[in-house]
């Protein structure tokens, strides 16, 4: 059962445009929502994360928007650059002693020059 | 030097063979994880360990086993490899003091013929 649903599967954006990737979750116990970025031949790396006590978090050109009532969160990449071309994974985890991340299926982003 | 290393980086093996993937970390983290990545399925947790004496199954542990030889070393074994275990395998670590971020190794691409 897919607990974190991610869309789209792939995305092509022109340089300077806005890239938007969406995720939806089912488990209301989730309290941490990170986004990981993966370049070809590399492992995923944490990009930005949010907790449900805020509706938005911004770090440079990357913004997470969080809608607790809809159980949805999204990644916005402003002024997208070719160097942003990568696979992006959303994830979620719940409170407690464990740190098990439930990942979405990934979005392959291509930013065309 | 990389904080999380995986060996081998690539491996081709035959059905029925036993194979071990190794992970080492210099981050001093107590928590270690094994994931597999498949196209369209994202990252799925195989096993995780919170210390040398603690091993836990993830969502897809069947056909796999693990060993935590030391705080810095966590190996994944395929007892009798089968073709549908062909995938990209990642090791990750995290610190109990910050249960949020996981740090991934560069991955091992495994092909089972």
Image (cartoon, coloured by chain):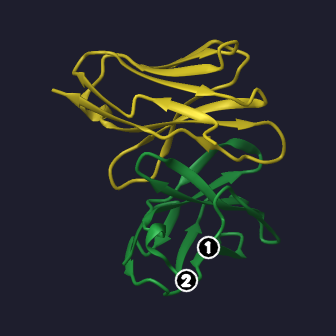
Chain colours: A yellow, B green
**Residue located beneath label 1 in the image:** B63
- Closer to the camera, B110 or A32? B110
Q: Residue at x 83, y 46 (%)?
A: A97
Q: Residue A92, position in %: x, y?
A: 65, 35
**Residue located beneath label 2 in the image:** B80
Can residue A11 be seen from the camera position used here?
yes
Determine whether, in the image, residue A30 is placed left or right of residue A15: right
Instruction: Return the residue found at the far bottom.
Output: B17
Determine whether, in the image, residue A84 is placed left or right of residue A76: left
Question: Which badge, 2 or 1, is on the more N-terminal residue?
Answer: 1
- Quarter assignment of residue B67: bottom right
Q: Residue at x 68, y 29 (%)?
A: A26
- Label 2 and label 1: CA atoms lie apart by 7 Å
Q: Residue A101, position in %: x, y?
A: 65, 44
Helix, strand or loop under label 1: loop
Which chain is disc 2 placed on?
B
Position of the C terminus of chain B, as image quadrant, is bottom left
Q: Are marks 2 and 1 in contact (CB under 8 Å)?
A: yes
Circle 2 packing at 10 Å, graded few (<14), some (14-19), many (20+), is: some
Up-down: is B111 above or below A88?
below
Q: Same chain, marks 2 and 1? A: yes
């Amino acid at each position: 059962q897919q607990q974190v649903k991610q869309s789209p599967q792939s995305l092509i954006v022109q340089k300077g445009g806005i890239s938007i990737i969406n995720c939806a979750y089912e488990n209301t116990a989730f309290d941490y929502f990170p986004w990981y970025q993966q370049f070809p031949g590399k492992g995923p790396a944490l990009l930005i994360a949010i907790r449900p006590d805020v509706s938005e978090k911004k770090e440079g050109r990357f913004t997470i928007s969080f809608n607790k009532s809809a159980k949805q969160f999204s990644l916005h990449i402003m002024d997208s650059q070719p160097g942003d071309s990568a696979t992006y994974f959303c994830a979620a985890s719940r409170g407690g002693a464990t740190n098990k991340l439930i990942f979405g299926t990934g979005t392959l982003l291509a930013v065309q020059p | 030097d990389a904080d999380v290393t995986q060996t081998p980086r690539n491996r081709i093996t035959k059905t029925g063979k036993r194979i071990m993937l190794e992970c080492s970390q210099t981050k001093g983290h107590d928590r270690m994880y094994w994931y597999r990545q498949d196209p369209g399925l994202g990252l799925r947790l195989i096993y995780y360990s919170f210390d040398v004496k603690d091993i836990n199954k993830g969502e897809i542990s069947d056909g796999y086993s693990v060993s935590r030889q030391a705080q810095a070393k966590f190996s994944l074994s395929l007892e009798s490899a089968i073709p549908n275990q062909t995938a990209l395998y990642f090791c990750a670590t995290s610190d109990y003091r910050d249960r949020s971020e996981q740090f991934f190794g560069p991955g091992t691409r495994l092909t089972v013929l």
